Image (spheres, rainbow, N blue to C red):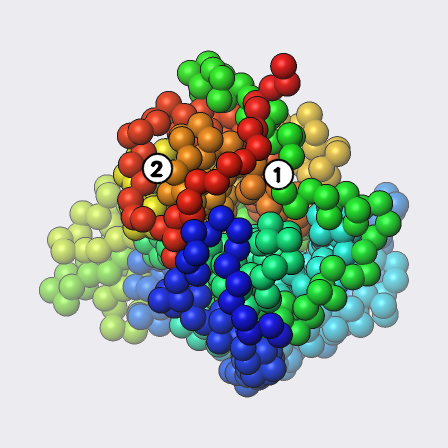
Amino acid sequence: MNRHDERPPGAGGHAPSTDKPAVRLALWSARHPWRAIGGWLLMVVVCLALGSFAGTRQADSVDYRVGEAGRAEEIAAAAGILDPLEEKIVITPRPGSDSLDEAAARSAAEDAVRRMTGAPSVAEVAEPERSPTGQALLVTLTMKGEDAAISDDIPGLLERTEAVSEAHPRVQVAQTGHFSMGQGVSESMGDDLATAERITLPLTLVILMVVFGAVVAAGVPLVLALSSVAAAMGLSQLFSHLFPSVGANNSLILLMGMAVGVDYSLLFLKRVREERTRSGGRIGDEAALRIAAATAGHSVVVSGWAVIVSLAALFVVGDVVFSSLAISSIAVVAIVLGASMTLLPALLVKLGRAIDRPRLPLVGRITAGSREPGSLWPRLLGPAIRRPRAALAAGLLLITALALPALGMQLSSTEVSTLPKVDAVQARDRMMAEFPSQGADYLVVVRTDAEHRGELRGALDDLVRDAGRDPLLRSDVAPVTRVSEDGGTGTVRLRTPYAIDSDRAQDALGHVRDGLVPRTAGKVPGAETAVSGDVARNADVLAHQMNALPWVVGAVLVLSFLVMLIAFRSAPVALVSTLLNVASAAGALGLLVLVFQSDWVQGMLDYDSDGFIVSRVPLFLFVILFGLSTDYNVFMVSRIREAALAGRTTTESILEGVSRSGGVVSGGAVVMVSVFVSFMFTDLLEMKQLGFGLCVAVILDVVVVRVLVLPAALRLLGRRLRWAGGSAHGVPAPARAPRREVRTTPR
């Protein structure tokens, strides 16, 4: 490696400052490349080893408790009368059969009872139950033990069910329930993740080869991103003991790790190549790396912190899903940030000029000639520079039009209808069709003080009597009443024939909470009442998320504004960047509603429209988009600021800054879209919606916001930008040298 420190052309005789931690860390890695690479590999191995040793703690039913439903379950569990979870074995006609073979079905049911009796985690096996139509049998398994232990035993139980199915080929035998559906969905997500990797990795490599024109340069970002993803997956297992895993953690780690890993590598690599080209080969590797670390490295650090603080706002929700996915995402972004400042400089030094080899025919020649900005970006920026008011109005009008459908967004937290149609989910659908009594249920919990325990039994009887008079609560299955040993807590489980996500099930919940409970059990002096059940849980989860939404949005806005303000010390820039991030997110949410609350493209994207958006998606989408949009803001504004501090006018600074950063932003956007689009082909509706939202948001952000709205807004602000400081991220302002005029349009 060349140790001399030649100054770049036009640098005014000054070298970049090394007082910033990012520069010092990058330079240390460049001067000790084998230590940096070895240390990085050791860190990855240690993270994977720690994760393997600690194992993954999956979230259980206790972790998901929120709102009144969660409080009801806590009270019942404390009293020892919370109904245990159940698994069901469903026996129906074989596909294509007109009716159930009754003899074969009875034989299969008896075999299932025999095999499941005494099985691990099975407390009781009920006698087979015949459906009202006579076309199905149901065997109920009452589970025992902690959720984690049951989950560990579920594969063995599914094997027993499969053995019953193989032994009785004249009927269809399948198992369903909370645990078996979770097992099936986890396996499906694992397959989807493998499919996403098979799509994403080759596509990303091809895109990077086009961007860099060389195979080695294209491989470096992938090495950084994939090693960071591996380390983050290991840490995610460790963190799951503080924030239990919810199943989609690895999918989100891959998505975020590939997106920011490639983005940051692209920015750093491009800057190193640019400085080498600009100097005409007169500066050494260390000088080029020092400039890249002081400029692109600083941008990477600011961008990384912006993404991290945006993701950290998800902890405000106080929900296990958001907290679990937030810590996993933060981990991978932080690791990518560390890799960009250590592994990347070390690799660049060891590879040296070999990073541009082997050069691809034609593509390599094109990219080699495009390291200095040409006429494309000035042409694209022409409307925003010449007519900034009109450009700003047009851009905002387009985004507003795209965002308007979001005003009609319908949210639902219903879980089952959004799950992939794995065997256990299909078995549940068949069970619901044949056994209406397995529909929505409501668990009423009543706790009294010691003075009024004698009134509890009468209050529960009144509740059961009044429920039988309510048309929405009538059922062929009698309510089940339980009372604790001390007589102070009681439960009543009411069953209805309605589907969990139906309007009548929602209406029935209102009848129970607002009418039935207050006029019966609620009349007992000092009584504490609460209602749970599947419908109540979904309603409370949605309400909990909606209550947290303003706080999360507020936290993201404030934290992102502060990051930009600290980074650029310009309030107008921080404000414009924050508002434009909101615009990108709003446009993406509008398009999400336009697509997924209708059925006009469901065949193309392979989903069944239920007319709603999964309630977690908008919040995740907003937070992730805010972080990623801030990336692009930082990349572009950093280059604009550099030009401004070098003495350029506002117009010249915008043209030069956007022209020099536009290739990085557009290249990173293409890679991001290639990563996000793979998640649109998963079977989980939530991931499909999230992938679509991220794709359209990135496209909208780059095509409209970065090319039209941001330059126009900065052009109008003009002198009010007031760039603080005398240098750009430690690079002293160069003297203004004569340069070729960059025109926005040909004359």
Residue 733 locus on image (x, y percent): 39, 48
Residue drawn at point x = 88 percent, y = 58 percent: 170
Q: Quadrant of the C terminus?
A: top right
Viewer can see residue 320 = no
Question: Does 296 sit left or right of 216 as displayed?
Answer: left
Residue drawn at point x = 84 percent, y = 45 percent: 362
Instruction: Name the residue beneath numbered marker 1.
Output: 373
Foreground of the two, 623 or 151: 623
Residue 448 locus on image (x, y percent): 20, 61
Q: Amino acid at mark 2?
A: Val
Foreground label between 2 and 1: 1
Structural crowding at the residue carrying mark 2, measured as other residues with C-alpha within 10 Å and reported as few (<14), some (14–19) or many (≥20): many
**Label 2: element kind:** helix
Q: Earlier in the sequence, mark 2 or mark 1?
A: 1
Foreground of the two, 470 or 727: 727
Residue 265 locus on image (x, y percent): 59, 58
Among the 4 quarters of the image, the one containing residue 233:
bottom right
Residue 573's label in the rendered image is: 2
Distance between the alpha carbons at the discs numbered 2 and 1:
24 Å
Question: Does 67 sit left or right of 295 as displayed?
Answer: left
Q: Amino acid at mark 1?
A: Pro
Please tell me how many numbered marks the rendered image carries: 2
Above-or-below relation of 100 to 513: below
Viewer can see residue 220 = yes
Residue drawn at point x = 26 percent, y = 53 percent: 529
Foreground of the two, 718 or 533: 718
Residue 724 locus on image (x, y percent): 29, 44
Residue drawn at point x = 64 percent, y = 18 percent: 746
